[in-house]
Amino acid sequence: MPAIDLARLRKQANRLADFFFLPEEFTKHLREILEFYVNYTLRTKENIAPGSNLKTYRTPPAVLTQIENELRAVAEANPQNALELADTLWDEGALETRLLAAFFLGRIPPQEERLLSRLTAWTQQVRDSHVRSALLSTSLTRMRKETPHQFLNLVREYLHPERLRTWTNGIQALLPMIAETPNTNLPAIFDMMEPIIEEAPSTLQNDLTDLIVALYRASANETTFLLKHILANTKNPMTVITLRRIAPTLPPTLQKELRDLLRPQPLATQKRAEEEPTDFILDEQPSINPAARKQKMDNTKIIYLHGLESSSQSGKARQFAEKFPGMVTPDFSGSFEERMKQLKPILGRKKNWVIIGSSFGGLMGTVFTCEHPTQVRKLILLAPALLRDHFAAYLNLEPVSVPTVIIHGTADDVVPLEPAHKVAETLFTNLQTITIDDGHRLQKTFAELNWEEILA
């Protein structure tokens, strides 16, 4: 391999850009450059990358980096041609050409529909760890930075509970976003990763190590809190086992914080209360058939969100508090954003919440549930202010399957019934509607409704 002369390499890469619009010619001249810089001291007869099934030129990374730098601007200015060139390079099948193909995908606007189809197909085809990493990081560069909402939706697809095989893709895709600062997406990332860390499959030990280290670097306090919360409340024995295995690779300060929770616990010392569901408490009345014991709702996991000009002392709030002692009925004030900031610390990272939202509180409950569906067991909306004319900026949400009930009066002159229900139908896939002959405040029929059954 000749010594790398940066001036010569820059000239070679610049000349390569002349063939950007001719994929076959581009590939031909790219091969010449890669061959020119082959490291014959490392090249084997088979010429296969270690741990991979891809052929390789054994070209130093600096060569590809220089080529990428010279082609970045022309690729972003011509995304259609960049996509065609990426296809040709991918089909070439070499480690270096596929890394360059992944780079070109990262220059394509996230709105381009064919971007995700390529990404999906290529991640399923590739076995090489370097190419897979490039597809999940470099190829998603623009989407991650320009349309983070779209990027996080893609990650949620990877992390779907029934797609364990793609969880590693979701974790690896998130790592660059976690590392980027300032990062306003951390709360959403923590919410997405909590059930993955709690599931803790042993096949993902290395990925979970990378994830936890990255989260700790981004926010040490929140990562420590999340892991302590998971370890203290999980019923999954694999959670402790997997985290105990990876603990030696975690930052020393984090190891110290988790040490007590990771110690093996004698079975005899476990409390019975820790073995029971967190969202229900078994009735302690004696029964001939223990399986038939009546279950009671945990009222401390029910929260009522009042309307815009209401408070915790409103008629509905007082009736709820009287009917379900111990339920949470906080006061909110200020703008919608300010109220949501007041709500999130109350709900924290606890799960199995039943949220009751009235009018403007219904909008709050809707937004929280769509953004944190794993924390909500059921959502009850009382004449919810789901009006796109007024609140469209807050209703650009992804549909969720959380069981949701809307109770709305036909004589509501504040929040029209039909427009609100149309919005709800786009957001909730498990929706029940209860239409009653009443006004916006539901004064006539509130006491007549079977709230135990509705909240069950």
Image: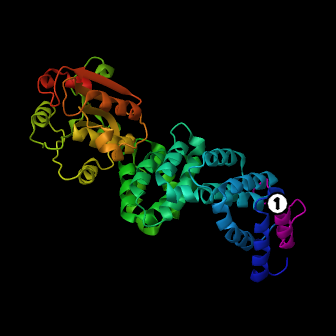
Which part of the image, by quadrant, shows the N terminus?
bottom right
Is residue 349 in sight in this rendering?
yes
Q: Quadrant of residue 222?
A: bottom left
**Where in the figure is residue 383, as x and y percent of width and height?**
23, 32
Q: Is residue 281 left or right of residue 69?
A: left
Residue type pointed to by label 1: Thr
**Where in the figure is residue 262, as x and y percent of width and height?**
42, 55
Where disc 1 sits, the SS reads helix
Q: Is residue 124 left or right of residue 350?
A: right
Q: Is residue 165 left or right of residue 42?
A: left
Residue 42 part of the magenta segment = yes
Q: Residue at x 78, y 77 (%)?
A: 11
Q: Residue at x 79, y 72 (%)?
A: 15
Looking at this view, is 411 or 9 the one in front? 411
Q: Quadrant of residue 9?
A: bottom right
Q: Main secondary structure of the magenta part?
A: loop
Question: Mark 1 — residue?
Answer: 27
Which part of the image, by quadrant, shows the C terminus?
top left
**Where in the figure is residue 201, as x and y percent of width and height?**
54, 45
Q: Residue at x 52, y 48 (%)?
A: 155
Q: Residue at x 52, y 57 (%)?
A: 144
Q: Is residue 29 above or below residue 310?
A: below
State which region is magenta: 28-57
Q: Is residue 25 above or below residue 331?
A: below
Residue sitting at the far top? 288
